[in-house]
Structure formats: structure tokens, C-alpha cells
Image: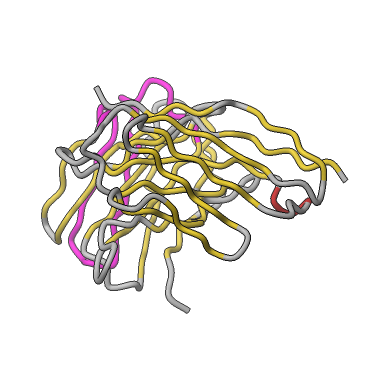
Amino acid sequence: GEDVEQSLFLSVREGDSSVINCTYTDSSSTYLYWYKQEPGAGLQLLTYIFSNMDMKQDQRLTVLLNKKDKHLSLRIADTQTGDSAIYFCAGLGGATNKLIFGTGTLLAVQP
Amino acid sequence: DGGITQSPKYLFRKEGQNVTLSCEQNLNHDAMYWYRQDPGQGLRLIYYSQIVNDFQKGDIAEGYSVSREKKESFPLTVTSAQKNPTAFYLCASSGGGQGKDTQYFGPGTRLTVL
């Protein structure tokens, strides 16, 4: 079935760039999303990319999509301590129209 | 402010009791969803509704029930048949305009069974 995978943990220093990676199996996914979850809170939509795009930039966030390798990444420039959270990658299934979530990447930002 | 609200934030239940979690949205979205989140795992879909008076089972519907009598509201009942109900429950909605399938989430309800 459809699957989305992410690495579990990433640690960076404040001011550095963070790159969170995601791979997915459903080549028919139409949209791919990044959500942020702070402790005890719901999911906050950060950005999304349509499957016919290679890149999308939104202030400090850059999303890269490699459809051939089914690989999605989220780059956060000038990472701040407030960026510490769990980041979820999700793909909208082309056949099912359901969101399939990865297990999340915990980003820890060291001051 | 437009958004999705869930109540209560924390809920405690004794074994054998049914409990209902509230989800309300004022975004005029047609579709609403319930997810369950367990520690170290992604979100799993319980039920979803694409229109009023209609809903479908997600991947883990057993032990749960829903209703969709109003566009704004999609309550979730966790029944005594749910074997392991302690979890964080998230409601979402989507609909309207470009990216109409983009889901927006509420703040969640943490259910603990004592």
C-alpha cells in the first residue's frame, strides 16, 4: 500500500540550515504537504507542493520535489529555537484522495 | 477568527464508558476528518465525511462512531468496544478554492482511559 517514510530525528545548531527528508511510494500523489507539530498541539500546515512542481519557496522554507526518486525535502534556512518541533510529511493519494502521513521527524535546535 | 475547535483538550474516561469528542469548524469546509495519533507514530485515519449526512470508515474505524448532521460539526464517539483508546485525537477539515483537499487541523483532544 501507500507509504511515506521519514528519518526520526535531526539536530542542528541555531542559525544553521535544516533539511528534513521524506520518501513516498505513491507516484500518483497529487499534492505533498509539510506540517509542523509542537508539543501537545495540533498540526500546523507549513507549505505544500503540487506534483508538477520541482521547487517551492516561502520565506525561510524551501520544498524540493524529485518525482523520479519519489523524494521530498523541506529546507529551513536560519533555523531558530522556535523551529524545534515534529515535522510531518504527507502525500495526497491519487487513487484514494486520502492523506498518508509519515511518522514524523523530530527537529531539535541547539542554541 | 476562522478555524477548527476541539473540546475538551483533555478527557479522562473509565474503562467501559463511551465518550464523545467535539469538533467544530467555521471555515465553511465540506469535508471533515478524524485521526488518531499514538506516540512515535504518524496519524491514522478513523472516519471522514465529505458532505453532510454522509461519512466513510477510515483505516481504523473499529470501536468508533461518528455523525455529520451539520456542516460545521463532526463529533467522534469512542465506544467501549475500542480496545486501546488512550491516544491524541485530531480533527481536520478541507474544502474550497485552490488546494481544496488541503487539510487544516484543530488543536487536538488527549483521551486517557483510567
The x and y percentages for residue B97 are: 25, 71
Residue for point 33% across, 38% down: A67
Q: What range is drawn magenta here?
A: B59-87
Q: Does the magenta-highlighted stretch encompass residue B61?
A: yes
Q: Is residue A89 left or right of residue A1?
A: right
The x and y percentages for residue A111 are: 88, 46
In terms of depth relative to the viewer, which is nearer, B40 or B11?
Answer: B40
Can I make out residue B99 in this image?
yes
Q: Is residue B83 left or right of residue B68?
A: right
Can I make out residue B114 in this image?
no
Residue A12 quadrant: top right
User: In terms of secondary structure, what is the magenta stretch mainly?
Assistant: loop
Image quarter where the C terminus of chain B lies is: top right
The x and y percentages for residue B44 are: 36, 33
In terms of depth relative to the viewer, which is nearer, A40 or A54?
Answer: A54
Total residue callouts: 0
The x and y percentages for residue B73 are: 29, 62
Residue for point 73% across, 51% down: A79
Residue for point 45% across, 42% down: B89
